[in-house]
Amino acid sequence: MSVTLTEIRSQGARRKVARGARRGPTARMVSAFWFILPFVLLIVIWAAVVAVTNTPMRVFPQVTDVLAALREMWVSGDLLRHLGASLRRVGVGAAIAVLTALPFGVALGVSPTLAAFFAPLLRFSVALAGIAWIPIATLWLGYSDSAVIFIVWNAMFFALTYNAMLGVQRIPLELLRAARSMGAGRLHMFFEVLLPGALPSIVTGLRIGLGYGWRGLVAAEIIASSAGLGYALFLAQTEFSTDVVITAMVIIGVLWLVMDRLLLAPLERRTVERWGMKGAT
């Protein structure tokens, strides 16, 4: 007999959807204003301090110097080249992490024995994931795209696995029993009950994991590549181009904010609103 989590999820999730639907454009504009305001103040303070102290560009650039460096990177094509390389690597690494971590995490959530065995190893590995593996990655894979993609995968895998495990463990027992009593098989249980039920925790893990993966990407590109935003930052440092260094840092930060604000945060919010369960702890 077919059964879906939609048919058995709690009334609390529906109320969350209704509350989310009532949020109008005014609330979003106010939220965007308060999000942007600290950055505007930071830029104003930055420009004023550099102007008043007459700081040389080699020590710290003026805002206009950074804008000029950004324009030069765009005109020369370096911006698109480095940006494309970084996005491609993080996209491939993230896709591999999702495909490998989710089945493993769900399996751990289903089996208390496996969870008890692997949970300490996962906690241990989270502290070492990503940047600490760069020397090993370059020994195994050389100074190549493969090494950088491995670092992104490594940085994301453990956070995704751990959150998938916790998500499955938080599914109310009544829902699991109801699905089994209605004849759900293993595949049906995985795709229709376990995976959707763990989705809020999985999306949170994806948001955290991509943060780890992004930092690992930049660090790996500094050491193990000849293109990418991390490499652009490192190359500018060797040429004492402080304006390009700060420009690369700003691009890295803005790109992550755009990904998090426009993609990951809304995805997490809507997932929790739709699939969040009142019985979860």
Image (cartoon, helix red, strand yellow):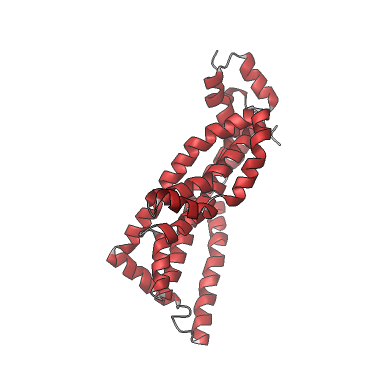
Quarter of the picture holding the C terminus: top right
State the image coordinates of residue 211 (x, y, percent, origin top left): 53, 52
Residue at (59%, 29%) from the top-left corner? 107
Residue at (32%, 70%) from the top-left corner? 72
State the image coordinates of residue 95 (x, y, percent, origin top left): 44, 41
Residue at (42%, 66%) from the top-left corner? 233
Residue 266 visible at all: no
Residue 141 visible at all: yes
Q: In this view, does 259 lie to the left or right of 144?
A: right
Count of numbered marks: 0
Residue 69 quadrant: bottom left
Of all residues, the one furthest to the left in this rendering is 76
Q: Is residue 208 above or below residue 75?
A: above
State the image coordinates of residue 115 (x, y, percent, origin top left): 65, 33
Q: In this view, does 39 lie above or below 174?
A: below
Please name whichever residue, 265 or 168, is drawn nearer the observer in this view of the structure. Answer: 168
Please name whichever residue, 147 or 263, is drawn nearer the observer in this view of the structure. Answer: 147
Quarter of the picture holding the N terminus: top right
